[in-house]
Image: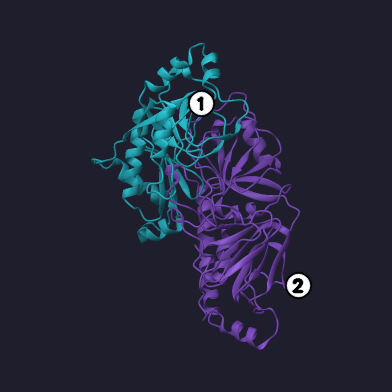
Amino acid sequence: MTDPAPRSRSARFAFFPLGDRALVIELGARVSEALAAQARRLSERLARAQVAGVREVIPAFSSITVHYEPLRVKQAADPEDAGSAPFELLQVRLQALLEADQEDAGAAGALLEVPVCYGGDYGEDLDVLALAHEMAPSKVVELHTHPIYYVGMLGFMPGFPYLVGLDARLVTPRRATPRPQVARGSVAIGGEHTGVYPLDSPGGWHVIGRTPLGLFDPRRQPPSLLQAGDRVRFVAISPERYQQLLAT
Amino acid sequence: MALKVLRAGILSTIQDLGRWGYQRFGVPVNGVMDEVSHRLANILVGNDEHAATLEMTLVGPGFTLNTDTLLAVCGGDFEARVNGEPLPKARPVLVRAGSALDFGPCRRGCRAYLAVAGGFEVESVLDSRSTFLRGGFGGWQGRALRRGDMLPTRHADPALYPSLHRKLREQRTPMSFPTWSATERVEVLMPGPYLLRFVRGRQWTRFPEESRELFLSSEYRIGSNSDRQAYRLMGPLLLPREPIEVISAGVTFGTIQVPPDGEPIVLMASRQTTGGYPRLGEVASVDLPLLAQLPAGARVRCQAVELAVAQTLLLEREREMARMREALAMRTST
């Protein structure tokens, strides 16, 4: 027994405090597409319920984080529960929502095709990465465009998707020294994940290509093209097509 | 109505209570480091607590004001002058048009909040006026203030503090202010060590017992590479013999992570939305304003408290803020 006992365990949902203004609901202890889909579906359900005091609900690989305002949770509670801590009050409320036998319409992840110009100036690490794995660069592209990935979570920076489903032959440890500047749109491999940099940023992943798609725009609603639980397929395009798409 | 920036200071950014609602898209919350000082400054000038203030860091900015401006400064103790005269802190001050408002180095703490009546006139992006420096949006043009900027302010209610307006008309002084001030809890006077209470987290017991005991019994210093994103705790390293594997998930203000180098890191206002390092726990919310005021080198000790204790402390603080808000609201008509 290495883990602490959760504050409460129902059949599937374990609640843990994340400090005094947030909590984590763990759905499982591994990374899987089913858990990511469940995190997405249930977090949308919790958000839709607009529980008093809940600030926001965030799905990740195998968990849901809920940020809340303890004072508002307390104020919204029944007078008979006045002795309970806000965490306990909220947990009871969220537990009931999670366990409710209901359909979650429209919460399935979308499939997005992401055009990528691989190699050359667009993916400066492609050749090195191919060399490291003793395969031709074209083989890297073939292996990278083959799977349908799913978004485990968004993090690191706005709109950055941690994509799961990378072919085991492409798994590559992150660069020892991060690059000070990785261009917006860069498609990269880091460990067992692949992802896309939505903004210019420092970064430690191996850049193998670039997409003309704008993954994040604060003036758009929602600001991110992708959400946790969505699915992605990469499609190889030529530099000409890249420039063409960028102009549109 | 604007503040003309003559000197920018080290890091002067527009912040509010944070960009909530977009972490699922990877958008950091940002917002003020010291929530209590920000809220108090807003209350003093009759603003909603969510209104944007200017957060200054270590060395403050210098301005000229092109209109009579009701303002308040709370938080760290910066040297501050209006046309060379000391600017009193933690109270409403009506400053005459044309005056120079000059902030110098911080003598105690490290951040202060300048609120102007009506608030700063900056665009709300994704429901917040907080500056997101790395993302380059929000606040004043998505960046820190620079020399030459004209920082616009919104229309202020002219009925606030009639006695200050009367005094300013009758006197030749560059500012008028009341004799009272709001009580501030600037604890950053003592040499330390300061007590940081924290709630043990999900992975607490996955750290070996000797790491946990070391963390609880040791004194740490705030690292010099600490900033709005994270505070580094310099002291005994926590190096479990076997790496603790965790699945990346959401983090929050005050999350204490331990990366592979063993040096604990407390995530602060500009933290990323998720983290993949094992966590010891989260600093109690009531202790975050203090932590935000601790400069590099300050000594801290961490003490584990039960969640119910941390929440009770937070509820007490909110009741205290509500009492203060009520008392100060009555004074705005005097």
Q: Which labelled disc corresponds to residue B84? A: 2
Q: Is residue B185 visible?
A: no
> Do we see residue B331 in this rendering?
yes
Q: Which chain is purple?
A: B
Looking at this view, is B292 or A236 the one in front? Answer: A236
* On screen, residue A129 above or below A159: above
**On what subunit does the disc labeled 1 rest?**
A
Residue B166 drawn at (x, y percent): 61, 86
**Residue B324 position by quadrant:** bottom right
Q: How many other residues sit within 10 Å of disc 1, few (<14), some (14-19) or many (≥20)?
A: some
Mark pair 1, 2: CA separation: 57 Å
Picture coordinates of residue B171, whole percent (x, y): 68, 86
Quadrant of res B116: bottom right
- Say which amino acid is labelled 1: Gly
Q: Which residue is at 32% across, 42% downward? A: A98
Give percent across and percent down for residue B209. Answer: 61, 31
Same subunit, labels 1 and 2: the answer reads: no
Left or right position of A3 against B94: left
As helix, strand or loop, the secondary structure at mark 2 comes to loop
Q: Are marks 1 and 2 in contact (CB under 8 Å)?
A: no
Q: Circle 1 — which element?
A: loop
Residue where numbered disc 1 is placed: A123
**The C terminus of chain B lies in quadrant:** bottom right
Chain A: drawing colour: cyan
Task: Give the mark toward the camera: 1 or 2.
Answer: 1
Amino acid at dot 2: Gly
**Which sits in the foreground, B118 or A207?**
A207
Left or right position of B27 against B261: left
